[in-house]
Amino acid sequence: MSITDMTAPAAALTAHDFHSGATPIWCPGCGDYGVLSALEHALAMHGRPPHEVVMVSGIGCSSRLPAYTSCYGFHGVHGRALPFASGVKLARPDLEVIAVGGDGDGYSIGGNHFIHACRRNIDMLYLVMDNRVYGMTKGQPSPTTEADWDSDIAPGGLGLRPFDPIALALAAGANFVARGFAGRSEELANLIVEGIRWPGFAFIEVLSPCMAFRSEAFGWKESVHPASLTVIDDRAAAQAATLADDGYSLGLLFKDHRPSLPRQTAPLASLADVEAQFGVCG
Ligand SMILES: Cc1ncc(C[n+]2csc(CCOP(=O)(O)OP(=O)(O)O)c2C)c(N)n1
Ligand code: SF4
């Protein structure tokens, strides 16, 4: 490399730089295409190259996303994206860590990890593509499915009350809580950049319709609307606004400033370093 090359400013990144070249096998019309596009644009705007970004996922259609990006990726075990992502971030705080997955992955089998990730506040982005159904395993209801959602697999509906992931995240202590929509890719990209740059755990619930098992979710594009406000540093007010909300408000809903983990910025050398981070005694 010549001296001129070494001093030349790095070329601006584009969304294309974050594309792996693998063709997604998602169904035509799946909302996850919009999320992938928004994420690639967001990463380009953020400006860190693909080799400095780690994408972690569990299992599900949505959890295939890391393979479609050129970043480092880990497609792991169902419901375990967050513990793995936490380990990566604690060991390599110099890397940008993004965990992704579906509502089944993150709110059912991974629900416990979700609660504790909100509480621990490790610096990473968690993007949940919520289609209110298990897409990959052919349409079982998830924790966000409406009680009366009728399908071949659950005739008449399960009769179980869904929970609101935004309310749960607030109750568990999350400090950056937002909702996006796969069909509004540009807005979602801006929200994702904000989440990546937030110094702590950033949670974005993305409404991402499953066309194969919930084609009525096409109608979500008529239901979504901008949130009337972002609540800052007042968790009780944010919770009250969430409980009064119709569940389709988009944008940054809450942010609160609280110190995040890890507190060091250099890569950790050993398990002892990780234990010291968490105050684990021998
Ligand atoms: C331990 C374990 N239990 C169950 C499954 C079966 N399984 C695979 S994906 C999935 C649900 C996926 O739903 P979601 O996370 O909402 O993703 P989507 O496919 O809708 O994007 C389930 C139950 C599994 N792979 N591993
Ligand atoms: S089954 Fe649903 S979630 Fe899975 S790829 Fe098809 S449309 Fe997307």
Image (spheres, rainbow, N blue to C red):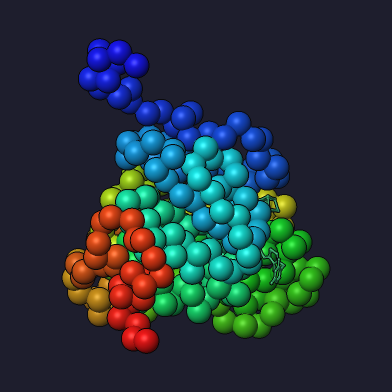
Taking depth in this image into account, of 85 and 163 the one nearest to the observer is 85
- Residue drawn at x 52%, y 55% is 56
Taking depth in this image into account, of 269 and 82 the one nearest to the observer is 269
- Say which quarter of the image contains residue 105: bottom right
- Say which quarter of the image contains residue 175: bottom left
- Say which quarter of the image contains residue 246: bottom left
- In the picture, the quarter occupied by the C terminus is bottom left
Q: Is residue 92 above or below residue 50?
A: below
Would residue 124 be visible to someone looking at this image?
Answer: no
Residue furthest to the bottom: 282
Q: Is residue 11 above or below residue 132?
A: above
Left or right: where 56 falls relative to 176: right
Taking depth in this image into account, of 65 and 263 the one nearest to the observer is 263
Ligand 1 quadrant in view: bottom right
Horizontal and vertical percent position of residue 151 = 75, 68
Total marks shown come to 0
Would residue 260 be visible to someone looking at this image?
Answer: yes
Left or right: where 151 falls relative to 219: right
- Residue drawn at x 60%, y 44% is 67
- Residue drawn at x 25%, y 80% is 236
Q: Is residue 251 above or below residue 77?
A: above
Left or right: where 22 falls relative to 197: right
- Residue drawn at x 58%, y 69% is 79
Horizontal and vertical percent position of residue 65 = 58, 48
Residue furthest to the right: 152
Taking depth in this image into account, of 199 and 249 the one nearest to the observer is 199
- In the picture, the quarter occupied by the N terminus is top left
Left or right: where 111 falls relative to 248: right
Horizontal and vertical percent position of residue 176 = 30, 63
Horizontal and vertical percent position of residue 51 = 44, 40
